[in-house]
Amino acid sequence: MKKTALFPGSFDPFTKGHADVVRRGRKIFDEIIISIGYNQKKTRREFEVDFMIRKIEEAFADDSGIKVITYNELTAHLAQKYNANFLLRGLRNTTDFEYENSIAQINSHIFENLETVFLITSPEYAYISSSIVREIYKYGQNIEDFIPYKL
């Protein structure tokens, strides 16, 4: 049976930490679907969704087991739609765990065959967060040390 995992997030922007989790997750899963949660009514993104899709696809162009999609529904419902029995999540610290643990429990309540797999972010990327990268970009700083693609 094919093991498919969703890797959901806003990915505004997709960072080297995210890429690390995906690459390591590919050792576990046959397919990873990077799922960008997107609500067309919310326009507060720093990086446009279509731009981010292109950049993530470029970063993983050499791996046919990685797909990139957008969605605007419950993550558990999306997993059912794609026959994904796993959610892949990266954890940088205990604060991430507390937040992700609650979400994992709700998702498994909605779709009982859905398991969340947590990977601890590699130490060299643990300090990188999308919100910090977004903030320094907003003020004109170079962010290429934090992202796995060229702007």
Image (tube, rainbow, N blue to C red):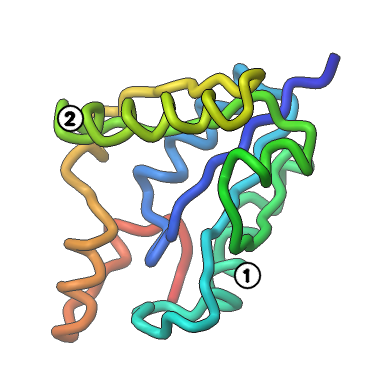
Q: Quadrant of residue 59?
A: bottom right
Indicate which disc, 1 or 2, sits on the residue closer to the N terminus. Answer: 1
Q: Sort mark 2 into few (<14), some (14-19) or many (20+) by Cα contacts within 10 Å.
A: few
Amino acid at circle 1? Arg
Residue 138 seen in the figure: yes
Rendering coords of residue 50 (x, y %): 60, 77
Q: Residue at x 43, y 60 (%)?
A: 10
Rendering coords of residue 120 (x, y %): 32, 23
In the image, taking residue 7 as reference, residue 132 lies left or right, namely left
Q: Quadrant of the C terminus?
A: bottom left
Rendering coords of residue 121 (x, y %): 31, 30
Residue occupied by mark 1: 54
Nearest-to-viewer mark from 1 and 2: 2
Residue occupied by mark 2: 93
Q: Quadrant of the N terminus?
A: top right
In the image, taking residue 59 as reference, residue 118 lies left or right, namely left
Q: Quadrant of residue 72?
A: bottom right
Amino acid at circle 2? Asn
Q: Secondary structure at mark 1?
A: helix
Q: Nearer the viewer, residue 141 or 106?
A: 106
Q: Residue at x 66, y 19 (%)?
A: 113
Q: Residue at x 46, y 44 (%)?
A: 19
Rendering coords of residue 101 (x, y %): 32, 26
Q: Nearer the viewer, residue 75 or 140?
A: 75
Q: Sort mark 1 into few (<14), some (14-19) or many (20+) by Cα contacts within 10 Å.
A: few
Q: Residue at x 61, y 25 (%)?
A: 86
Marking on residue 103: none
Q: Secondary structure at mark 2?
A: loop
Question: What is the CA distance from the residue labelled 1 to the residue labelled 2?
Answer: 29 Å
Callout 1 touching callout 2 (CB < 8 Å): no
Look at the picture and state if 123 lies above or below 51.
Answer: above
